[in-house]
Amino acid sequence: MNTLPEAPNQLDQLVSRLLALELRVDALEHSAQPAVARVSALDLSGTVPQSAPSALAESGNRLNFTGGLSALGAALLGIAGAYLLRAISGASLLPRDFVAAIAAVYAAGWLFAAARITSHRFGAALYATTSIFILAPMLWEMSIDFRAIHAAIVATVLALYAAIAMYQGRSSMRSAIFSVAFAGAACTAIAISIGTHQPLPFAVLLLAMVAASEATPIREQVRIVRILVVICADLALWMLIFIYRLPAEERADYPPLAPSIIFSVALILFLLQVTTLVYRSILRLRPIPLLQLVQSVVAFMLLLGSTTLLFPDSRPIALGLPCLLLGTVCIAAAYGPLRNDTHGRNFFIFAGFGTALTFAAAFLLAPIPVASVILATAGPVFILLGRRMNSVTVELQGVLYLSIAAVASGFLVNVSQAFIGPSPATSSWVLFFVAIIAGIAYAVADELPGETVGNQVLHLVPCLLAAAGFAAITRDLLVSLVAPWIALEVFHVAVLRTISLCTLAILLAFAGARLRRLQMTRVAYITLAVVVTKLLFEDLRHGHLGFIAASISLVAVTFLAVPGLSRAIDDRNIPTV
């Protein structure tokens, strides 16, 4: 009775035969001698010697090296053909526009040849490099040296070339073709636009290339090339803005161009970047890359630059309306679809840009006092909205609105003059308005014990602004009451300032203890420190002896009252300083 062979022996034989078949297929695809050497490494009994894998690797490396040398030799022949065409063009043996057409077809042929090399990435990249080295010098000579073809025709040829490269390099296996051809076409467009003094056709070409690079299926594999194309588009647009902002007599070599056309180019570039950013962050919910964020900012700055330099008469509206519109969209996107996004960076980016753009729009579209009133009014609204939404970012936005309004309106200058100025200057209405709004903003804030440091700072800022404003108001009231009775001297004003600050510190300590408001107690201690500083540098320096004694007594009473009144806060184990 026949016995069956053992299973492990059958498995070894099957593996050996499969490896032999792979080597035979490899021998058919490549040169015969190395493959025969690999096949002979197999034992006729079906066993594989240990040296077979290393022999296979060495043979593969040898094949890659041989293929690379072959591709390099073919590329050199292609370059030689390009020099032959340039020689024919220089000798005027054929019409130069006809030679240019032959060179363009010749370069496109090398792209098609590169697409046929699927097993050798280096060879495909080398053929694509040969293609752009054929096309770019020929276009330069024809358009700049010989003036045989117009810049618009050069841009059209580059557009067709880029379209062929995009089609041939549409798969990840052929991404080298797309990368080399697109990068070469973009750099060629910038160079010829400078040489021909015709920037508009090439700017339009680069816009189309930006759109194509963003729409290609292999956009992630060619990220560096996409960045290069966008940089070239930025440079082309900047040249348009820089050149056509000059008077007509200083750019006589350039064709006349309407400012609206340049603005349209800037707007299209900006919309392309914004569309990509919105698609990636909102529709696909992916984190925004840093380079894409930077490019969007650059495109927006170029858009603003085009409106500022080309439309100087309508500068505020031309700048303010885009800022207002884009800021509103950013805020709506941040607190809409991006609020619960897992990528928190997208939310903060949109919220930050929305806040900054609304700041710019307010001061561009309205006078500074009106813009300050608008921003100050928006402060408590956003703080209350953040409390309802349980969003610290929204509260931060409200505090920023209030702080910017206080700086821009002159509120801080009014407060400093009220307590540092040499004379009792009358405070403006902005001081009263901002102080009241800051008090409302602090009142609507939901201050709780045990908050984080960030939340405490958010509540401290409006409380500090309100306290400073009401201290200045108190000083104005005291001055208005005393001024009809006596001629105010420096020591009189110093005592009135001390009275207003000490009164504010005591009231804040009392209210903070009763209302369980930690920030009011902290501002009371801050006010106490200001009083001591003022006593040393103003009262003791300029005061009358009797008034100095009154000031010291007021400060002493304040030192006794503030800690005693703030003990209720201490009972809840919350630090008071």
Image (spheres, grey):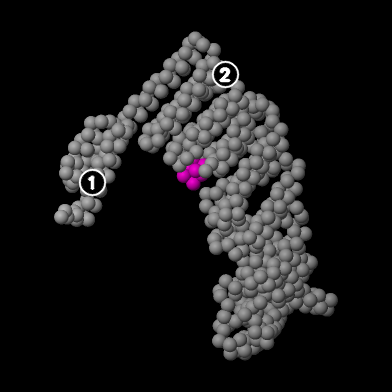
Query: Depth check: 360 or 117 in front?
Result: 117
Q: Secondary structure at mark 2?
A: loop
Whether residue 225 is in magenta: the answer is: yes
Q: Indicate the amino acid at tag 1.
A: Ser
Q: Residue placed at 74% from the left, 70% from the top? A: 437
Instruction: Determine which residue is flagged by label 1.
Output: 16
Q: Indicate the amino acid at tag 2.
A: Arg
Density class for disc 1 (Cα within 10 Å; few <14, some 14-19, many ≥20) is some
Whether residue 209 is in magenta: the answer is: no
Point out the stretch of residues depicted in magenta.
218-226
Q: Is residue 155 visible?
A: yes
Density class for disc 2 (Cα within 10 Å; few <14, some 14-19, many ≥20) is some
Q: Residue placed at 54% from the left, 37% from the top? A: 232
Q: Residue placed at 77% from the left, 78% from the top? A: 478
Q: Residue placed at 50% from the left, 38% from the top? A: 170
- Residue 105 % position (x, y): 50, 22
- Residue 27 % position (x, y): 27, 34
- Residue 110 % position (x, y): 45, 27
Q: Secondary structure at mark 1?
A: helix
Query: Depth check: 137 or 425 in front?
Result: 137
Q: Is residue 412 visible?
A: no
Q: Are marks 1 and 2 in contact (CB under 8 Å)?
A: no
Front: mark 1 or 2: 1
- Residue 410 % position (x, y): 71, 63
Instruction: Determine which residue is flagged by label 2.
Output: 147
Query: Residue 577 occupies which quadrant of the picture?
Result: bottom right
Q: Relative to residue 286, is residue 263 depicted above or below? A: above
Label 1 or label 2, whichever comes before in sequence order: 1
Kindly report the distance in space between the C-alpha atoms of the residues bearing marks 1 and 2.
Answer: 67 Å
Direction top: furthest residue: 93
Query: Total of numbered circles in the picture?
Result: 2
Q: Relative to residue 574, is residue 288 depicted above or below? A: above
